[in-house]
Amino acid sequence: MKNNDIFKKIVIANTFFWIVITAVIPNLLLLIASLTQQQYEQPLNLRFSLENFHQLFSPLYFKVYLNSIKISVFTAIICLIVGYPYAYIIYKEDRVYIKNILLIGILMPFWTSSLIRTYSIIFILQFNGILNKILVGFGILQRPVNILYSESAVIFGMVYTLIPLMIIPVYLSLRRINNDLVESAKDLGAHSFQIFFRVILPLSKSGITSGCFIVMLSSLGMFYLSDLLGGSKNILIGNLIKDQILLGGNYGIGAAISTIFYIFVLLGVLIQKENYKINFD
Amino acid sequence: MLRILKNTYLLCFVVILYFPITVLILNSFNHSKLSIGWEGFTLGWYLKLFESPIIIKSMKNSIIIGFLSAFFSSFIGTIASFGFYRYRYKGRKIIFFFIQTMITFPDIVLGISLALLFTIFKLGFGFFSLLISHIILTLPFAIMLLITGFKDLDKNILEAGKDLGANDFNILIKIILPLIYPNILAAFLICFTLSLDDVLVSFFVSGPHFEVLPITIFSLARMGVKPEVNAICTLMLIISVILIVFSQLLLKKQTND
């Protein structure tokens, strides 16, 4: 039985080791870096300072945050409006094979590289791209316009790459709905619009919040998307962090922004506790 | 009326979702250098890939990193989820909570925190930093996948093994592994694709001498559309789709049995 104990210890130690390395140490370092002032070439010292947060709120960066948050809010709203019906249709579909096809249809983009999907949008939006050709061909536009390298191109790209992240949680929350509630609403004489707006929509709220949350958080960091589709004018929080670290070796701003991200993630986790219930027993 | 509306919506949705990728794939076979109109079929851009040492090198790097990180993640993940399944210990719930939050965390934060780690401990940026980062990136997904596999196991089998005198190591190797290997393989494939597709973490932890494919694609794509990039993107898409389809088939077979 002694060997058994050793084995048990190895198993548990392995888990602790990797989670401590993966979750705790790097994030702790980031937290420390955000609360200390960086000196040249030395990202970490232990003198407490709020300089990074002070810098964070300088009006210089304010436009970037505003722009970035605006884009992510728009993205989440459009993803929700466009994606919710898709999730609802999957949920409503009775035929298993069609349900599976629809699910695969949204999971495929989820699993393929978002960089490649972002790149493929250039074909559609560029000056001599397909969208311009269609618009000119139908006589909607007199001559091609520049769609690429604009804010709308960035929002389109975000919606295009992030919409699976909205549809999946919404679908999962719809699937959790107890069908008896829908049936009893029907028995009590509610028509289908009432059932949708007063039973199903409120019950899928947890999926909507987690979908919006994931989409917004992801969109704040996607610097490659704004680089490829937004040109140099549309800078996001992600670009700011990237430039500070890569060009200036300055971890302070990135660390401070990440700390704010932590707070948001923790808030999000607290808001939707039921999704985080321990359910492996 | 509602039916027509629904079908129109679905049609538009799927067409818009898949149209850009289809255009990309078609253009990788297009003779036109500017990818504007169709000028005839060619495989030339794929052949040209082999003349580009940068792309070939980072493709090789990507495959090595993807393979190794997927291997380690599924290995460590199997042991960790066995621990979750078999033992009750202090901190078990906190660890599981960490794993769940790590999946929701924005990748860019993971990228910066790891870059900071490697800078502070002066570990350098290259093969090692990428490998560790990709293990960290994929491990939570591997564990979540494997835990569902363990959850489906019949607990009686475990009890029977224990009654017959098997120790935990033997239970894992002789009883659980043969039952759960499709999940492990699926976890491996999914980790491989995640590693292959990752931009945000790799961007911060790769070095000038060791780049992975998404980083190379990103720097090439910034100059606009290029036929060689179309070809390599198409190859990557095909690889991802094959791996994912295969992993889903493995998981499905598991639930059907």
Image: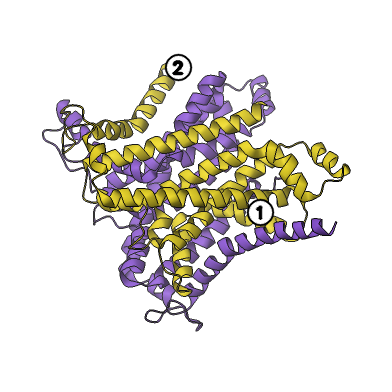
Secondary structure found at label 2: helix
Q: Residues within 10 Å of mark 1 (few under 14, many from 20)?
A: many
Task: State the yellow chain.
Answer: B
| Colour purple, chain | A
| Chain to which the residue tagged by mark 1 belongs | B
Q: Which residue is mark 2?
A: B3
Residue A83 versus residue B106 in the image, above or below: above
| Relative depth, front residue between A142 and A243 | A243
Q: Secondary structure at mark 1?
A: helix
Say which amino acid is labelled 1: Phe
**Residue B54 seen in this snapshot:** yes
Viewport quadrant of the C terminus of chain B: top right
The residue sitting at 52% across, 41% down in the picture is: B189
Residue B30 found in image quarter? top left
x%, y% of residue A17?
A: 63, 63
C-alpha span from label 1 to label 2: 44 Å
B213 lies left or right of B151: left
Mark 2 chain:
B
Q: Is residue B174 above or below residue A237?
A: above
From the image, tell me which residue sits under label 1: B96
Residue A205 makes an appearance in the image = no
